[in-house]
Image (cartoon, coloured by chain):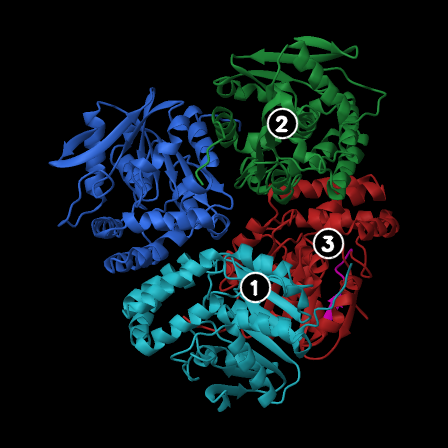
Chain colours: A red, B cyan, C blue, D green
Amino acid sequence: MEFLFNDKKVYYEIYGEGKPLFVLNGIMMSHLSWKPFLTEMTKHCKVVLFDFLDQGASAKLPDEVYTHDIQVALLRKLIEHLEFKTVDLLGISYGAQIALQYAISYPDMVSKLLIFNAASYTTPWLRDIGRAWIGAAKTYDPMHFFHVTIPYIYSNTFYTNNIKWIEERKELLKLVFDRKFLDAMIRLIKSSEMFDVRDSLSKITANTLVVGSDCDYITPPDETKKLASGISEAKYFELQECGHASMYERANEFMTLVNGFITTSQSLKIV
Amino acid sequence: MEFLFNDKKVYYEIYGEGKPLFVLNGIMMSHLSWKPFLTEMTKHCKVVLFDFLDQGASAKLPDEVYTHDIQVALLRKLIEHLEFKTVDLLGISYGAQIALQYAISYPDMVSKLLIFNAASYTTPWLRDIGRAWIGAAKTYDPMHFFHVTIPYIYSNTFYTNNIKWIEERKELLKLVFDRKFLDAMIRLIKSSEMFDVRDSLSKITANTLVVGSDCDYITPPDETKKLASGISEAKYFELQECGHASMYERANEFMTLVNGFITTSQSLKIV
Amino acid sequence: MEFLFNDKKVYYEIYGEGKPLFVLNGIMMSHLSWKPFLTEMTKHCKVVLFDFLDQGASAKLPDEVYTHDIQVALLRKLIEHLEFKTVDLLGISYGAQIALQYAISYPDMVSKLLIFNAASYTTPWLRDIGRAWIGAAKTYDPMHFFHVTIPYIYSNTFYTNNIKWIEERKELLKLVFDRKFLDAMIRLIKSSEMFDVRDSLSKITANTLVVGSDCDYITPPDETKKLASGISEAKYFELQECGHASMYERANEFMTLVNGFITTSQSLKIV
Amino acid sequence: MEFLFNDKKVYYEIYGEGKPLFVLNGIMMSHLSWKPFLTEMTKHCKVVLFDFLDQGASAKLPDEVYTHDIQVALLRKLIEHLEFKTVDLLGISYGAQIALQYAISYPDMVSKLLIFNAASYTTPWLRDIGRAWIGAAKTYDPMHFFHVTIPYIYSNTFYTNNIKWIEERKELLKLVFDRKFLDAMIRLIKSSEMFDVRDSLSKITANTLVVGSDCDYITPPDETKKLASGISEAKYFELQECGHASMYERANEFMTLVNGFITTSQSLKIV
């Protein structure tokens, strides 16, 4: 399904019944990435998948420079459009950044906030990695873009143990990483460069889960831990032997945390 | 409620509806320890709490030397008595040892196995810590028993940050740690000394969750990790800044993992 | 050799040539514990071994309650007695506490400070472990004292892998842990209870090395790390798969750090 | 100074007195990189700095495809040329690979082997990162090459905390990364692709130190640990809050380990 946001097409899909869980994509992902998870995810909630502007089936923004504000506004409109009041948000990486900003801007409208593999700001280190990605995109060589980006999205162990699957993905992504995709990537990466919510984390009132991975080479676990420690009562988990794309590397652990966090009140006080 | 096992009283309680989840106590715990968790636990299943022999409201075994086999047999009878076919088992520490032995002896009768803070055998190190506990029990000085056992059940950070609660528990446990309790503890600790399932882990066919804690000074995380790696497809989590009594130190994280693991199929295959 | 401090005998030995390195014992150690290290230690310095009051060959203090101040004063007198101006101090555990207090009281008189397996204060958790040790000592049962104290001084892995050596030590320590020894231990442990240098660490001007162990169950690595972070320019190492008695578990790594830290200026500035 | 190896110029410099320590550069380094360390390094040994073929002041190999064998042969000739019998080898990253191969080929001629930030083979993951580097080099855009390579050589924390120094290096390296340098880099990276000593590690008889870094995103610590566990009696250290270029991030800790390992016999047996 789709709706218009500032005259731009935004694509979304809705599955299941229950309280609404919006799923926010990582930068190279689209709503399609979540298909394998739907059976598990819809056990407890109505799942809304959608693509951000410059992602998947939503509109591209060829001539624009923008910040995360535009995606936050899009999400706000989509939630209004679907007539939800409060929602749960699940975001990974780029999607986690938008989820954090949304929960800061609309604290009363987020019930549970599930943050995977994110930092509280784009450090100079991560900014320069982003510049490497932009530089690689600008060569319009899909294999170069693959090699600069994909290995670091996974842990060494996962990549090495699943090298056949990785090689298959190379063939697949060769076709995906076309000029249009890479131009969109450049805009999306640029829009992440100024991300910084360090001073606003205390505004978050949602019940928050933060999950890091011990072998995350994009948002290293010390950054994820710092993020968690800035959010009141956030629950922190660190996945073991896992890289940045935790949903792929540890799909069952990922779903265990999602289903567990969503169905648990998080209000136990033993001490 | 109660039933007789070899003419010994076994106490149990049942809560909620759904597929049965048997909860197996740690060595110093009883069915009462789980009361704060019932609201969360019964969201998805019928929860069976019970006390092992020499624990809580079940019979004491004053003149006996026994091994885990007796508790495994007790659990078998209780499950038969309640006319369940396959069940989920959740055990922590001592309870996890019994759960592992049960899942090894009756692989077809365990659907999901949730193991918290356990090792695959009683290492010489853990055996000698057990001897310290026995030695302390034999003084029949409740404060000495407290100081020898309780600090190491928690992480330094938790114990230090919650020292008021700890001091209250000292007062409380002073009364609990009477001669009868300590004599039972001695028998329970002795029965753990020979625990060793290293060679049988491959018999487990249940969907298994293994959870360790980074600051567990009784069953250190390297042992928990080794245990997990011996069980086919086991999912491993390591709680951060958490000690051996993970259910108390991280009650919400504990429930998140329990509810998540129980409600998720654990059969996702992305790669 | 010996000298009198407040009319009490203090035993010491001197080995080698070079700048003076004073070696400060852990609580159950004596100057004898360092004999295996002398060949390595004297490669670069004049090594002074000695026993604190209530330790080894120094005087016992049967009827006294004291704090670390007395041992710091003893060390001051010993250094004056030997006519050294500035010295290097190496302390482990209890000895590290005294070394820290000395470096705080006499910052100009310490050149290099080497701290192994220590925290910046006796946390309530560590205090209660101390009380377990005192309680065990008061039974005057050497095996009970052994089981309460020794397992936690080592990592599970080391203890388990070297269980024969441990069993030999049991036989040996059975004789060492006599009434006189245990009474002295009680006083030494009590004197540690008030140790707290958190507010004074900034006074340390010595070049400082802080070494923790990942499996230290007495002074867990998070405490050692915190200690290091309170000392200006301190260099921090964390020994892997190693317990509290790092000098025994990782003798060569221990000596590598000692010889390396002592012979290196620690003043490199690359950035 | 220089000598000819297969008619190719090899540049080297010798400093200090004592037993010879050969220092083997990382892939982007040259003998110049070690200048800040010479005062410390020459305290205990005669230091030999040199550049591998295609590095620094040694000859470039424009039209050749080669493996590490050529650099191992070069090192052999240099050691013969200088008339040393047994030597100590210190290598970091690429240099560590050559040092490992040398110690495998000439076990009797290496006394101490100091390995920093290396794995036992080029995993598919690391191979693809190498391909990203090659792809970036082939653009001949020095800033793109910088962004693809340099951030991952440091930890996020170091890079972020020293961003001014990093920006200065950008300006500097803009000039260094010229066509000739980048072409040599391509050859050097390619020569690393087949590196694999997993099956030969047991041949190493040298006293070996292996050092990893917890935030090493090129040779992650699990790989370094595995390497260490393959070498008989290897001593393993893991630097805390440190990236791949450990000598820059933790210069004093680096020198502490080097001086400590070189001056200690590594033959202590406590247990």
Q: Residue at x 48, y 35 (%)?
A: C253
| Label 2 sits on residue | D91
The amino acid type found where label 2 is placed reads: Gly
- Residues in magenta, as a range: A48-54
Q: Quadrant of residue B129?
A: bottom left
x and y percent of residue A68 in the render?
67, 55
> What amino acid is found at the position of numbered circle 3 in the picture?
Ile
Q: Secondary structure at mark 2?
A: strand
Residue A114 located left or right of residue D271? right
Q: In the image, is A246 to the left or to the right of B253?
A: right
Q: Is residue C87 visible?
A: yes
Crowd class of label 2 (few under 14; some 14 to 19; many from 20; radius 10 Å): many
Residue visible at 17% across and 30% down in the picture: C3
Between marks 3 and 2 in the image, the one whose residue lies nearer the viewer: 2
Q: Which residue is mark 3?
A: A27
Whether residue C216 sits left or right of residue D149 in the image: it is left
User: How far separated are the C-alphas under marks 3 and 1?
Assistant: 31 Å
